[in-house]
Image (cartoon, rainbow, N blue to C red):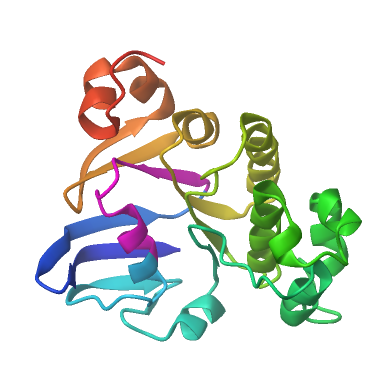
């Protein structure tokens, strides 16, 4: 579904992604690393939001390198950006109605409200009045309404209370059981290891290690080197 081949990305003179490569065919793939490792730049590069200087990104068999974001979304990627980026002045239902397509198979307004009943309870509320967890549910629902083959989520647990993170773990596992592929970019070790069996560790704009959830939690050297965790979790 997604192949990233030796991409190089710059912000000005800063070389952020330095030959990063990965492939994601199915299930949940976790991407972890310290702040500044290149995680968000990877997500933005895949979605065409920052230019790739060299290398190639392939989505569903098509070269999407530096294509407009709307074309990449049409190829089958639903994007949940860091910080959620919902529209403050729109209500929950206005967000949903803006994206939903009547009569479309798969994800529709009814189905996303079944997945996140809290959004149904807040359907008339403006997004700026929602809690952080509710905003995250709305951002995920918005992406699902595109009926993607792959859900790309950048730091979905950021700023959320542990009880909300636990809810997200349950919902993401439910989505994975439907066959939806998920690329989970995270710093939250609990969330990532609960969901992703395969985890890529980024450092200095490159994939420096590939491991499993169980190995990562048990490997003190990996935790210290790539996540700054000084003890076993």
Q: Which residue is drawn at 38% across and 76% down?
A: 49
The residue furthest left is 13
Q: Is residue 89 found inside the magenta-colored segment of the image?
A: no
Q: Is residue 39 found inside the magenta-colored segment of the image?
A: yes
Q: In which quarter of the image is residue 106?
A: bottom right
Kindly tell me whether residue 128 is visible in this rendering: yes
Is 129 above or below relative to 195? below
**Residue 55 at x, y = what percent?**
19, 72
Q: Is residue 214 left or right of residue 126?
A: left
Q: Nearer the viewer, residue 124 or 97?
A: 124
**Residue 178 at x, y = what percent?**
70, 50
**Residue 67 at x, y = what percent?**
37, 85
Kindly tell me whether residue 108 is visible in this rendering: no
Q: Which residue is drawn at 80% across and 51% down?
A: 115
Is 152 above or below relative to 208? below
Is 208 above or below relative to 94? above
Quarter of the C terminus within the rendering: top left
Q: Which residue is drawn at 65% across and 50% down?
A: 132
Q: Is residue 33 left or right of residue 214?
A: left
Q: In which quarter of the image is residue 24?
A: bottom left
User: Magenta segment range?
Assistant: 27-43
Instruction: Give the mark count.
Output: 0
**Residue 213 at x, y = what percent?**
42, 27
Quarter of the N terminus within the rendering: bottom left
Q: Which residue is drawn at 67% across and 56% down?
A: 135
């Amino acid at each position: 579904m997604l192949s990233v081949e030796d991409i190089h990305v710059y912000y000005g003179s800063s070389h952020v992604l330095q030959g990063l490569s990965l492939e994601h065919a199915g299930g949940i793939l976790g991407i972890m690393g310290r702040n500044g490792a290149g995680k968000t730049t990877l997500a933005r590069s895949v979605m065409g939001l920052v230019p790739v200087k060299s290398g190639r990104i392939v989505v569903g068999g098509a070269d999407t390198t530096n294509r407009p974001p709307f074309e990449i979304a049409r190829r089958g990627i639903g994007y949940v950006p860091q910080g959620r980026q919902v529209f403050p002045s729109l209500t929950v239902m206005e967000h949903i109605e803006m994206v939903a397509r009547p009569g479309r198979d798969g994800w529709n307004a009814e189905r996303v409200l079944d997945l996140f009943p809290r959004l149904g309870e807040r359907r008339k509320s403006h997004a700026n009045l929602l809690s952080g967890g509710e905003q995250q549910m709305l951002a995920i629902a918005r992406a699902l309404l595109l009926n993607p083959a792959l859900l790309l989520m950048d730091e979905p647990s950021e700023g959320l209370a542990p009880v909300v993170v636990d809810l997200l773990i349950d919902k993401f596992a439910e989505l994975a059981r439907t066959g939806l592929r998920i690329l989970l970019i995270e710093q939250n070790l609990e969330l990532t290891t609960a969901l992703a069996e395969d985890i890529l560790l980024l450092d200095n704009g490159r994939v420096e290690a590939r491991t499993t959830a169980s190995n990562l939690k048990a490997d003190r050297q990996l935790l210290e080197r790539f996540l700054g965790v000084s003890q076993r979790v």
